[in-house]
Structures are given as C-alpha cells and as structure tokens.
C-alpha cells in the first residue's frame, strides 16, 4: 500500500509496460520466435508481479484487508506456476502444450483463491448507514442474487459453447478430463465476473477501488481465455500474441489492486451512478436475451446446426432459474407493498398523535373540532369541549424529575380515555394541557366531573374549562370555542384550581 500520488505514478508505469509488451509482441515490433518469448515472459513477469504485490502489502495490512491479499497472492502464485510450466513447454521443450496438463492445474488454481478474496472484500462493509438492498440481506434477497448469477453464467455459457467451446470439444473429441478442463475456464471466469458485478452494486464496500482493479484484472484474464478458446475452436494455425494481452494486463491490474490506497472504513458510502444501477438491474436479462435470440435463430433457421445436449440442458436450467426468480420477486414485491402500507399507517398515526401519551395531537384535535362545528352549524348536533390543565405540574417536574412527570402525563392520558366514549376525542394540546371533544351529548359537564374524580387516582388535580354548544350560533367558530374553553379553564385556575367552569 502506497500513497495516492505514488500509486498513480506506479500504476501508469506498470500499465504502460504491460501494454508496451503486448503491442510489441502483437504488431510486429518483435518478430518471429522473439515475439513468442516476449509474450510468454511478459505473462510470467506480470503474474509474479501480482503475487509479490499481494504478499508484500499483506504484511502491513490487518483484518479482511490482509485476508483478501493473502488469498489473492496464493491464487496468483498458482497462476504464475501454470504460466511457468506453459513457458517451459514452449520455449525449452519446444512442443505443444498437452491438454490437460499441469499448466491447467496452475491456471485454474486461481479460481478458489479469487473466490475467497472476493467474498472477503464483499463482507468488509461500512455499517454507519442503512442499505435496504444489500445490508443484512434477507433469505429471498440472497436467493435472487444467486439466481441472477445462475442466469448470467448459464446464458453466457450457452453463448460460449455455441460460438467456440462446443466446436472445440467436438473437434478434439476429448476424454472426461479434457472435457472438464475445457469447460472449467469459461464457467469459472463467468462465475468470478458475476460476483464482481454483484459486489460492485454495494455502495457500502470499503475496498471499492481494490474491487474495481481486481475485477478488471479478472476480466482481462477471462477475455484472453475466451479468445484462446475461440481461436482453437476455429482451428486457427496459431494463437497470436494479441489474444494473450489479457494474460499480460490482467495480472498487472491485480497487482495494482493490492497496491491501491485503502479508503477509511469510517468514510461515507460512495454513490452509485444511475447508469451503473441500471446496468446492475439489467444484468441477468441482457445475456439471457442474446442467448435466447441465438437459440431461436438456430431452431428456426437451422444454419448453425441442431442444439446439442449441453445447450438444451443449460437452456432449461436458465429457464427454470428465470421462472423461480420472477416468483421470488413477486412474493417479495407483495411483502414490500404490505410493509409500505403498514409504514404509511404508522407514519400517519405518528403525524397526528402525541408520542408520549398516544393521544391525538393539537392538529388532529383542531381538525375534529372543525368537523364538529360544521355538523353543529348544519344539523344542530350538540357537542361539548373540555380544556384540562393540570395544577402545579411544574412543581412535579422540579421535585421529582422529568421522567416522573412524563409517567404522570401518561397516566393522566389513560384516565382521560376512561372517562369518554371511543368516538370522543382526547388530545394533548401541549405541555400539561389536554382537550376533550364530546359530540352528541346533552350534558357534557358530566364528563368534566368524571375527569376531576379520575385524576384523583394519579395524585394530581386539574382545572377544567367547559364550553357547551347546544344551540346553533352562526358567529361561533372552532377557534372561538377553543378560546372560550381556554378562558373558562383559567377562570377555574384563578379560583384555586381543582375546579370546573362552564360556558354555554
């Protein structure tokens, strides 16, 4: 791990050297056997460079940052061993590399270690802010990610098999071991690339720069694997060095991933651009569409030959994965809709009710008072309004503390609810003030007397102002009625408290 400026200089130099080696071997700057030597040694050099970078930086790293470097270092050591064997076959023994060979074992040994490294990077995440998509994924969300990966890998494998791998296998008529080696390269490449794409959608990854460089390096290796398979399938007389450019540049990028500065785990999560979000959402469907068009073309036109057993089996597997994914998504969406409705109900309740007592708040109380006044003016429906203020409540807070005062307010709210019907409205208007709206009752003052008696159970008294609206008054408004109830309450308080004043 080095500083940002030194990393930029190092990255420029390493990439320039890797590109220069590939260009020199591919475009005739170095000709004949010299191009083969340069190409093979460049691949080996970048492989050893990646191995050294991973292990050198792991010495000073800790935790997940150390573990992914150690795993990737082992993977690149195995890959470099495979490249060393390939170079030995070509340059020393001067014979064609057999298939399968020990070199294949070395090349493929990178797969399990890269898989472990990617999982370690994926689990090293910030936890300072919620991420509903990927944080603490539910079982169904993990299943969707797994099915997405299966759809992508299956679709791309059909494409690979149809365009190159199938012809390669058919032409060589390989045995079981050779067949497994032939399909191992594209399948494992696709699996690793899908994991990189899935992890890249997580905004909370700490090692995002390392993941990007590591993903680009693995993509380079995969590109050359596919190019090699295609050239062999079309029986090309030789594999040009240009097809091996990914074997040179890919390991170089993996080495740079180990050298890249590590972001602070405490820094905020990065933002995912909208185009990248769309790419992630469309990830399972683009390769599926392409492979489906290819299979449809072969089925209808038949110019590429009939489908073989591998294509049919892989196609049915992908089809089943698509159906299962849609079913899981449908169930998840249904649950999400129910959750949103419940959240809306909760938010609506919180917006109109007092958090401490659970009573209606002032806004809801005034709206219900407006409705009662409208019904009173229109139909003559009587109602009564009680304004309740606790006596000497400040002394309770000062002597016993605010926690005791809050508990007393909650008990007062419970007693007030017990004094009225479910259809009546009890609200906390603010502080130690409460309002009670009683509709359709001829003598609401009886409710006021019940309130005074009930509050005796909580060791506190109250002053109550009551306004009775029995006969229609065209000039009365909800605000004026509430103001009259407030004045009546203050009259009761001036009389010494624990009293009742009624305005009609």
Image (spheres, helix red, strand yellow):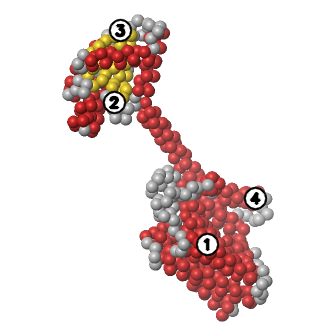
In 3D space, how far apart are the residues under numbered discs 3 and 4 (Cα atoms)? Answer: 87 Å
Question: Looking at the image, is 337 positioned above or below residue 150?
Answer: above
| Label 2 to label 1: alpha-carbon separation | 61 Å
Whether residue 68 can be seen here: yes
Question: Residue 66: x percent and y percent?
Answer: 46, 73
Instruction: Measure how far apart labels 4 and 2 are at the Cα level.
Output: 75 Å
- Residue topped by disc 4: 297
Of marks 4 and 1, the one in the foreground: 1
Q: Is residue 170 visible?
A: no
Q: Which mark is residue 431?
A: 2
Residue 372, image x, y percentages: 43, 16
| Mark found first going from the N terminus, 3 or 4 | 4
In this view, 345 is above or below 370: below
Residue 482 figure quarter: top left
Of the numbered discs 2 and 1, the one sitting upstream in the chain is 1
Front position among marks 3 and 4:
3
Q: Secondary structure at mark 1?
A: helix
């Amino acid at each position: 791990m080095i500083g940002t400026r030194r990393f930029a200089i190092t990255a420029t130099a390493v990439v320039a050297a890797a590109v220069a080696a590939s260009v020199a071997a591919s475009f005739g700057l170095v000709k004949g056997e010299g191009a083969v030597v340069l190409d093979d040694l460049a691949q080996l050099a970048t492989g050893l460079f990646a191995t050294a970078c991973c292990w050198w930086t792991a010495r000073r790293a800790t935790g997940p940052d150390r573990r992914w470097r150690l795993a990737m270092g082992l993977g690149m050591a195995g890959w470099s061993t495979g490249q060393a064997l390939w170079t030995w076959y070509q340059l020393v023994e001067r014979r064609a590399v057999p298939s399968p060979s020990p070199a294949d074992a070395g090349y493929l040994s990178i797969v399990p270690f890269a898989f472990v490294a990617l999982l370690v990077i994926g689990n090293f995440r910030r936890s300072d802010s919620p991420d509903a998509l990927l944080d603490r994924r539910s079982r169904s969300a993990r299943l969707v990610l797994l099915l997405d990966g299966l759809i992508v890998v299956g679709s791309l494998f059909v494409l690979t098999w149809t365009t190159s791998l199938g012809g390669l296998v058919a032409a060589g008529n390989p045995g079981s071991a050779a067949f497994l080696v032939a399909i191992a390269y594209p399948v494992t490449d696709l699996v690793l690339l899908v994991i990189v794409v899935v992890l890249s959608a997580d905004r909370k990854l700490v090692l995002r720069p390392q993941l990007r460089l590591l993903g680009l390096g693995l993509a380079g290796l995969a590109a050359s694997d596919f190019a090699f398979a295609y050239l062999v399938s079309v029986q090309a007389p030789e594999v040009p060095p240009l097809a091996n450019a990914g074997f040179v540049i890919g390991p170089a990028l993996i080495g740079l991933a180990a050298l890249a500065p590590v972001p602070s785990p405490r820094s905020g999560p990065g933002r995912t651009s909208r185009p990248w979000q769309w790419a992630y959402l469309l990830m399972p469907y683009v390769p599926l569409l392409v492979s489906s068009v290819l299979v449809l073309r072969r089925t209808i036109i038949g110019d590429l030959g009939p489908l073989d057993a591998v294509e049919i089996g892989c196609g049915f597997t992908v089809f089943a994965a698509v159906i299962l994914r849609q079913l899981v998504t449908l169930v998840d969406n249904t649950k999400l809709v129910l959750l949103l409705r419940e959240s809306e109900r909760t938010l609506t309740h919180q917006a109109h009710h007092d958090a401490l007592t659970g009573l209606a708040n002032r806004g809801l109380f005034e709206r219900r008072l407006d409705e009662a006044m409208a019904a009173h003016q229109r139909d003559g429906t009587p109602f009564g309004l009680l304004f309740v203020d606790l006596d000497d409540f400040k002394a309770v807070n000062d002597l016993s503390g605010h926690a005791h005062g809050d508990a007393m307010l909650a008990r007062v709210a419970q007693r007030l609810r017990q004094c009225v019907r479910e259809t009546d409205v009890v609200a906390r208007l603010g502080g130690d003030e409460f309002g009670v709206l009683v509709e359709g009752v001829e003598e609401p003052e009886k409710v006021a007397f019940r309130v005074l008696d009930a509050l005796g159970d909580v060791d506190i008294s109250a002053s109550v102002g009551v306004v009775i609206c029995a006969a229609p008054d065209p000039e009365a408004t909800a605000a004026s009625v509430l103001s009259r109830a407030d004045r009546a309450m203050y009259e009761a308080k001036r009389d010494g408290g624990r009293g009742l004043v009624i305005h009609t």
